[in-house]
Image: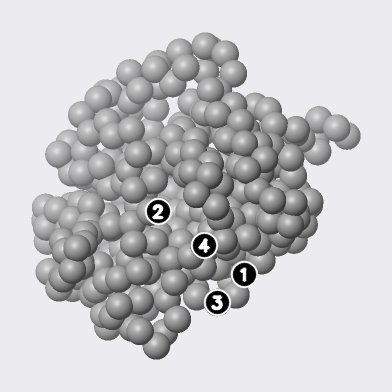
Amino acid sequence: MKHPRLALSSVFALALCVAMSGPDPVVTAMDEAGSAFLDSLTDDQRERCTFEFSDDERTAWTYLPGERQGLMIGELSADARAHMTKLMQSALSSSGYLKAEGVLILESVLNVLQPNANRDPGKYAITVFGDPGEGAWGWTLEGHHLSLNFTANADDSRSTPLMFGVAPAIVNGGPHTGLRVLGAELDTARALINSFSEEQREAAKLDADRPRDVVMGPARSEPLGEAGLMGSSLDGDQQSMLFDLIAEYTGSVKWWPSQREQARFLQLGDLEEAEEPLSQVKFSYTGDVDSGLLYYRVTSGRISFEYAAIGNDPNHAHALWRDLDQDFGADLLREHISKEH
């Protein structure tokens, strides 16, 4: 949920009211949607789709094209595809769901633009780990330019790594002309960068060459560096733009972490009272803002949001949200183990 001009104390109060209202309905909806989806499959499909929660496949992720474990969505019946949609909508917000479906649409666009590249929107794998509603469980939907990873237990849920990619970034022909799946991630960052003073721009500019992809991909388990412009050095309007940018990533899911986790991420308490709000949040970038050959990141400790134009193609981009403490529900599992032992 975006809150560009709302005091964080009000946001936290709202989150606390929700937390005190009872079990999280989103988690319950995801449990029910997961069970219904599995029930809609044939026995053979269910066998190929399901894994033990402890299976290494649960934390093996990639957004590159290639073969994958699991059940391809192109094999689903109309009823099963409808149940998969409900599962997606139980975890993703409206904007997040449209981004995910937009990635599949772009794969069909690529199939026309690259007829020999074997692009196929049906070649996205869905997998379920564990039993929905029976302790810890998770599910993924993954293929070229998409990696959705959700983990839940009876009390909470996690949604990272979360990755959307686009090619083309802007569709220039056919029935989907004008489609920009990651348009807001680029436009909001542009607006923020263009608002910088020379001093702010210098502090935000990365010294290294522009990365040709997001840095926090599957091969990396260490946080990004400390370089960047501190959020505390932004004026009020700029902080609002930074909140909007963060919300383009976190707003893809239906839940925001608990009040405690909000504070842990933002590290700011009350905007009106904190001496140095947003002091732990940093923004940095490099590349050409106008052309779209841009790389930027927002970081806070071990949490990162990245956007990268791929190679020298501004019409090909990746956007990624990682939380090294919570990816694949790592913190939920640690808490479970500590309670059990």
Between the residue at mark 1 and the residue at mark 3, the CA separation in whole angstroms equals 7 Å
Residue 66 shows which numbered tag?
3
Where does the C terminus fall, quadrant-wise?
top right
Q: Amino acid at mark 3?
A: Gly
Q: Residues within 10 Å of mark 4 (few under 14, many from 20)?
A: some
Is residue 200 found left or right of 41 in the rendered image? left
Label 1: which residue?
A: 68
- Residue 128 percent location from the top left of the image: 67, 49
Residue 118 in sight: yes
- Residue 154 percent location from the top left of the image: 68, 28
> In front: mark 4 or mark 1?
4
* Mark 2 / mark 1, whichever is N-terminal: 1
Label 4: which residue?
A: 74
Write down the quadrant of residue 132 in the picture.
top right
Q: Amino acid at mark 2?
A: Ala
Between the residue at mark 2 and the residue at mark 1, the CA separation in whole angstroms equals 18 Å
Where does the N terminus fall, quadrant-wise?
top left
Is residue 329 found left or right of 88 in the rendered image? right
Q: Residues within 10 Å of mark 2 (few under 14, many from 20)?
A: many
Disc tally is 4
Q: Amino acid at mark 4?
A: Gly
